[in-house]
Image: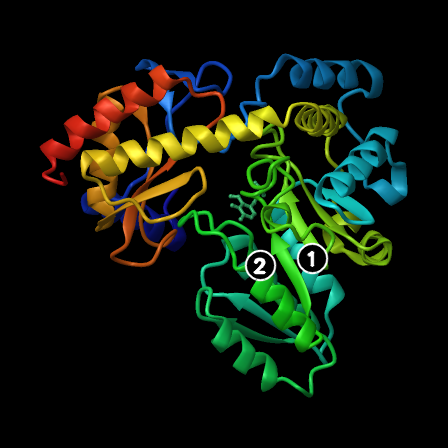
């Protein structure tokens, strides 16, 4: 088949390969864990998964999914309001709200959908939404969609720059609703949002604060309740979105946690709710079991935080200069995309799976390898990975 589209994308794919930016998929033949079985490579240590608490293969989490398959069957067979909502969704949503400290929660098939639903459903042409410059792609696309659907105004503030945000909010006095959106942990940097300042600023300007805690749920705070717990501010964020596809079992799904009214309104009007099936009950049940596991085992969060601290300190000791931070996301900036992909390839050759990220996932010239640490990593896993970093770092003259 040859048509203009086919010709264009075939030529672009060739460009990606020539530039060294082509992403090759690695196939796994077993569950996510601190080590995974990779087709053609055997067992490798994985430092690029969001399985922060090691719950994606936790026996209680897997068993809950299997039991739900027996009890509820494969899926919902339609949209929730048309065909019925399973009781497991209600139980999951109550647990999500309890975990992050809001009155209610509503699940979606992904955090992407949750982020798409919030501005596009809640805002109108009289409103403004302001987004941190480094927010996740799902927030950015959700806002683009909101602008097209609702005709709301949109703006971007410099990453973490509260003075810039303050000025933009001050200039928007005529807007009926002002919504500020930030990641809780910025996924490519590992930086934590300045939540106390953001809350203060939003209160002063009567703005609504939305925090996407996808990388912070299960990760930050003594009990893994997220960015708000990290700062002692549980209950102070207006709207939290998060994923079930990372620390909470790693399968899929997301949620919006907010007031009962916001969640009810999203149930009535959010297009991803009204026109798309709900989470499969297997996933809802394993996510619920993950939250219950987390509530019963806060020591997992402490183990994650200790592992992240150890890896970061050792990496610094080797002479690498990872971006400063205190989260399990530890990026090493390399510059060009091809350099990040090359380092990632060399590390894989040493049995360590760390993905290299380049443009357009991160800004041009700031390509990086991003290490993600899990509570499930043993000291031996981390030490073996560090030995690979040392070897490859010397080979590439980075250290
Ligand atoms: C900050 C952030 N928000 C949202 C998402 C989307 O999550 P999901 O996989 O549930 O759609 C991600 C996933 O990479 C993310 O990092």
Q: Which residue is mark 1?
A: 237
Q: Are marks 1 and 2 in contact (CB under 8 Å)?
A: yes
Asked if 263 appears above or below 331 in the picture, the reply is: below
* Residue drawn at point x = 59 percent, y = 23 percent: 55
Mark identifier at residue 195: 2
Q: Nearer the viewer, residue 247 or 31?
A: 247
Quadrant for ligand 1 reads top right
Disc 2 element: helix
* Residue drawn at point x = 34 percent, y = 36 percent: 312
If the image is split into quadrants, where does the N terminus sit? top left
Give the image location of residue 289, x and y in percent.
72, 23
Q: Nearer the viewer, residue 218 or 342?
A: 218
Q: Which label's residue is closer to the chain start, 1 or 2?
A: 2
Disc 1 element: loop
* Left or right: residue 320 compared with residue 91: left
Rate crowding at label 1 as few (under 14), some (14 to 19) or many (20 or more) other CA atoms within 10 Å.
many
If the image is split into quadrants, where does the C terminus sit? top left
User: Which quadrant would residue 382 be assigned to in this image?
Assistant: top left
* Residue drawn at point x = 53 percent, y = 82 percent: 167
Distance, label 1 to label 2, CA atoms, is 9 Å
Give the image location of residue 157, x and y in percent.
49, 72
Give the image location of residue 298, x and y in percent.
63, 28
Q: Nearer the viewer, residue 129 or 322?
A: 322
Give the image location of residue 353, x and y in percent.
33, 26
Q: Nearer the viewer, residue 321 or 394?
A: 321
* Left or right: residue 232 compared with residue 159: right
* Left or right: residue 77 compared with residue 152: right
* Residue drawn at point x = 22 percent, y = 35 percent: 317
Q: Is residue 114 visible?
A: no
């Amino acid at each position: 088949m040859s048509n203009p589209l086919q010709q264009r994308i075939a030529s672009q794919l060739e460009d990606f390969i020539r530039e060294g930016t082509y992403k090759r998929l690695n196939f796994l033949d077993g569950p996510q864990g601190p080590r995974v079985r990779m087709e053609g490579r055997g067992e490798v240590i994985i430092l690029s998964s969001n399985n922060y608490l090691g719950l994606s293969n936790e026996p209680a989490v897997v068993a809950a999914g299997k039991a739900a398959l027996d009890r509820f069957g494969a899926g919902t067979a339609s949209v929730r309001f048309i065909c019925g909502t399973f009781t497991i969704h209600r139980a999951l949503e109550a647990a999500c709200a309890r975990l992050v400290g809001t009155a209610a929660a509503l699940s979606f098939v992904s955090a992407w959908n949750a982020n798409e639903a919030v501005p596009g459903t809640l805002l109108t042409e009289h409103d403004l939404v302001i987004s941190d410059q480094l927010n996740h792609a799902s927030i950015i696309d959700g806002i683009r969609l909101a602008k097209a659907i609702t005709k709301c105004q949109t703006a971007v503030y410099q990453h973490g720059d509260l003075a810039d945000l303050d000025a933009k909010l001050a200039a928007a006095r005529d807007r009926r609703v002002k919504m500020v959106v930030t990641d809780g942990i910025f996924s490519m940097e590992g930086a934590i949002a300045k939540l106390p300042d953001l809350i203060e600023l939003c209160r002063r300007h009567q703005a609504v604060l939305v925090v996407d805690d996808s990388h912070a749920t299960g990760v930050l705070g003594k009990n893994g309740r997220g960015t708000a717990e990290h700062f002692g501010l549980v209950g102070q964020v207006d709207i939290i979105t998060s994923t079930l596809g990372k620390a909470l079992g790693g399968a899929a799904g997301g949620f919006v946690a907010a007031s009962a009214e916001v969640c009810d309104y999203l149930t009535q009007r959010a297009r991803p709710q009204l026109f798309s099936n709900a989470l499969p009950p297997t996933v809802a049940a394993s996510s619920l079991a993950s939250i219950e596991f987390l509530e019963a085992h806060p020591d997992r969060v402490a183990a994650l935080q200790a592992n992240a601290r150890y890896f970061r300190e050792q990496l610094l000791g080797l002479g690498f200069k990872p971006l400063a931070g205190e989260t399990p996301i530890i990026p090493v900036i390399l510059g060009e995309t091809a350099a990040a992909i090359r380092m990632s390839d060399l590390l894989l050759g040493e049995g360590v799976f760390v993905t290299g990220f380049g443009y357009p996932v991160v800004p041009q010239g700031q390509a990086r390898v991003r290490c993600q640490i899990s509570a499930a990593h043993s000291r031996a896993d981390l030490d073996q990975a560090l030995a690979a970093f040392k070897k490859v770092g010397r080979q590439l003259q980075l250290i």
